[in-house]
Amino acid sequence: MSSYPKFAVVGHPNKGKSSIVASLALDNSIQIGNTPGTTQVKRGFPLKVDGKVVYELFDTPGFQRARRVFSWLEEHGDVSADKRADIVREFVFKHKENNQFRDEVELLEPILAGAGIIYVVDASKPYGAEYEVEMEILRWCGQPSMAILNLIGDEDYREDWSRALGQYFRLVRTYNPITAGHREHLELLESMAQLKEEWTNPIKKAIGVLENLHEQKIENSISTIVDYMVNVLSFVHTENIKDEVLSQEEEEAAKVAYREKIIRYEVNERASIERIWNHNNIEKKEGALSLEDVGLFSKESASIFGLSQKELIVTGASAGALTGVGFDLLTAGHSLFLGSVIGGVVGGVGAMFGFDNLYEVKVLGQSLGKRELSIGPMQNLNFPYVLLGRSLYHASTIAKRSHAVRSDLDLNNNSFTEKIMEASMRKELEKLHGKLRKSDEVEDELLVAYKKVIRESFRQLLD
Amino acid sequence: MQKNNSQFTFKSYLDLAQLLKQYQGNHEDNRVFALTQTTKGSKLLTLWKDKNLFRVVDELDSSKYLHYLTLFTSLFGFALLLLGLFTGFALLSYSGKEPVNVIYLLLVMVGLPLLSMLLTVLSMFTGNLGASFFNHLSPLYYLEKIINFFPFAKKIDFSALPFSATLSKWIFLQRLQLFSFLFALGLFFSLVLTIISKDIAFAWSSTLDIDPVAFQGVLAMLATPWQSFFPSAVPSLELVEVSHYFRLGEKLDANMIQNADKLGAWWKFLAMATLTYALLLRLVFWFMMKLGFKAQLKKEVLAVVGVKKLLKEFETPFVSTQSFKQEKHLEVKEEVTIAASEVLADNYAYLLAWNYSEKTLLLLQDHNKVEVTNRQVVGGRNSFSEDQRIVDGLEGKILLYVKAWEPPTMDFMDFLTDVLAQKEVTTVEVCPLGTVTEGYSSKKSDIDVWLKKLEQINSEKLEVIDV
Ligand SMILES: Nc1nc2c(ncn2[C@@H]2O[C@H](COP(=O)(O)OP(=O)(O)OP(=O)(O)O)[C@@H](O)[C@H]2O)c(=O)[nH]1
Ligand SMILES: [Mg+2]
């Protein structure tokens, strides 16, 4: 027998075994389906640190012919309790090639190889005596065991279930793989550590490893967000123009190109975040990449993530803003603000900043008679907060998303209600935004301070 | 000097930067690499670079740039050596009419080098802007500008090179020392050659009214480094006095002619001054620039995009949670081909309840008000043989209640197949029911699960009822 703890997640079909494994193994590729019998073979999910296994979790098919198995066991099992595991072993040995018991063989094998039993039931449905056969078979295996009450539906029959399960399992815990986050994950591991004395230390180690991993992911996310902000805000789009003067079409086309590039930055940033959290291949509601669909430049996104005029002034953005473009923006915002108050739309004042003032289009002369236009860096005072708000919202949603969830990622801006940061934090951010707006060189200390604010805000969103 | 962790050469720095632009590996590979090596830090970085450099298929920036540097350096180094030689000859050209002015020589051989060293020091200790100002004062700066117009320099995309203005400054300063050294070497050779091949009279003269005593003081000060071991190379006050000449005197001072043999003693001083200030001190400077360059290089290696991440990945344990076994799962079927009917018949020969208790069955029958002749609980806690006995006695129309929320297992399917196989059984209507709280009516999604499973059984006797 190998030295590390193993656990087999077993139970009736369709009760969320694979969902639980997906959430514990942080793997969103596991097939989960509402058809019983989705999982057909057992699969081990080892937690490895530098290639060394700390513990291993098995996803298994559900019981299909429990009664038949049990009647075989009873027929052959007129033995003392300590020999019963051997009878089960014999069963598995004799039926390896038998397709009829393929699922039972698959699920019993890891248990007979020393895995602890994690029996999963759906406690939102009434208890039924038919489960007793399964539990009886598991009892015959003689391995340490616990039961998990999963709540798939809305009702709660946990009391009935606990009374019955208590007779077969040492521990009974509630764990909902769809809503479980990092903390619930670790709590479940704590319970698993209690199943057997020799397992306590390895599982404690696993908890430490997963805690570090989680921290690492948070740090990587923060770095990704900061890099993204610096890149987007300092981005300058240039292209050649045909004539001496800039035509209207050229200007419009360049503005579109600029915005598309910004959207591309956002798409890439999100992909990086999803990679960090093992959430690759999530289907997104947002669909094809077009300016309108993404919503980055929408009024709605501005009203949710943007700052009000007052907030901008408090933030210090106005200090640099009272000249040039910034001033225009503020006054434009002001008149729009009045307009909308009269119109009865109060809401977030950020919406009042139209995104037409994102950029200054400049025409630059060039040596060989060619001319270039350039757009950027981003001039809008509020837009950095929209970008940042959206990215923090997305990143925290991804970080909190269980790997058992298979629904599309729906990042509806409107569902975002939390406060992202305090005014004092924004003041810190504005220092960097201001520098990038002016294409100034950014010192390391400034980036460190910026990162600190992002970290604080991100952690707040995760709690 | 060759300490283990200061081995990052300029070339490996350039290569690393180019490699990282194309390839950064992933955490797993990088961590595994770090674990298989015994070194850490920048040495490990070098090893990683060596292992992965094959991935860069374009010509290496480093070979282009270093080729350019070498070519530039040797070309101009040689040119400056010659320039020094010719400058020396020109300065020492002695027609016999007029002695060679020592002050002039000292300015070129000692003054100029000291001035450029001063600029170097100022450039060393100032930031980018200041340094750039001081560097602009040096002729070499313009030389480099010119060189960039040459075809071989055109091949290099300087903007693709990773280093900062500060590192360029150190490269520049290093080269400045080398070129100055070569120039001074040319001067020195010309001095030696001239001394060997000609008899030169040295003298000194200035438009300014310089007091010989003060002048000798300055000279003695310059000669301090070799005074102790080479006293004859220190001009004495007597020598200084006799070799003072005035252009307006037209012809040579009688005094000077008298002391002609003494005047020749100047060359020792000049040679020693050049050797000490223009050559040896320059070497010291060159070495200092090298150290400065190295220190800066070390800093810039860390600033290369991707290096910090790489170093972190070397040190952070790699955690994996995924399975390495191929998944095998049921094909996900979306559509259901059979439909549930909604009507119950008026009466049944048998009512079977799968996985229900006797008590619940009574309640169910009461609720649904169906007329049945026989009633049986199947599945659940029944043993296999009990169920078999029930199946054997079945006949006619059968209503089979199942829990809609519990998906059909193969145990159930076996049972149903057995029932359908009974000759006397005419129809079997499977009726999935909801929970008590749902009023026994089942959810659409649950019914779908049942339909999907039951459509696998191809029997005309089978029907699904959704009440
Ligand atoms: N709402 C909700 N649904 C859940 C939960 N756990 C599982 N499900 C759903 O229940 C269904 C079955 O989940 P699986 O994880 O595939 O169940 P399983 O036990 O592995 O099923 P088999 O592999 O067929 O034995 C899926 O449709 C899941 O989305 C839960 O905690 N909440
Ligand atoms: Mg499964």
Image (cartoon, grey):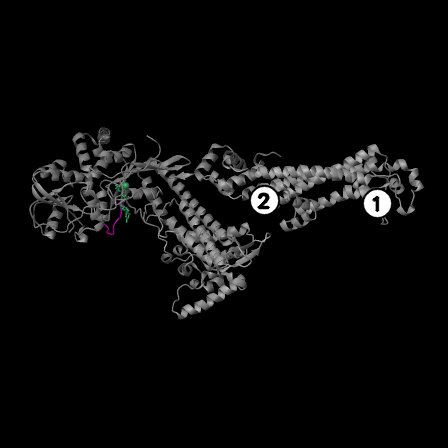
| CA neighbours of label 1 inside 10 A, class few (<14), some (14 to 19), many (20+) | some
**Amino acid found under the numbered disc labelled 2:** Phe
In-image side of B255 versus B346 (left or right): right
Is B162 one of the magenta-colored residues?
Answer: no
**Amino acid found under the numbered disc labelled 1:** Phe
Q: Quadrant of ligand 1?
A: top left
In-image side of B379 versus A329 (left or right): left
**Spot occupied by residue B175 in the image (x, y as percentages of width and height):** 67, 40
Mark 1, ligand 1, within 8 Å: the answer is: no
Please state the chain letter of the residue tagged with numbered disc 2 in the rendered image: B
Using the image as rendered, state which of residue A351 and residue B401 is in the foreground.
A351
The residue segment tinted magenta is A149-156
Earlier sequence position, callout 1 versus callout 2: 2
Disc 2 designates what residue? Answer: B158
User: Vertically, is A81 above or below A245?
Assistant: above
Mark 2, ligand 1, within 8 Å: the answer is: no
**Residue farthest toward the right in the current orientation of the protein:** B254
Residue plotted at (45% across, 50% down): A225
**Spot occupied by residue B311 in the image (x, y as percentages of width and height):** 50, 40
Disc 1 designates what residue? Answer: B215
Query: Which quadrant holds the N terminus of chain A?
Result: top left
In-image side of A117 versus A52 (left or right): left
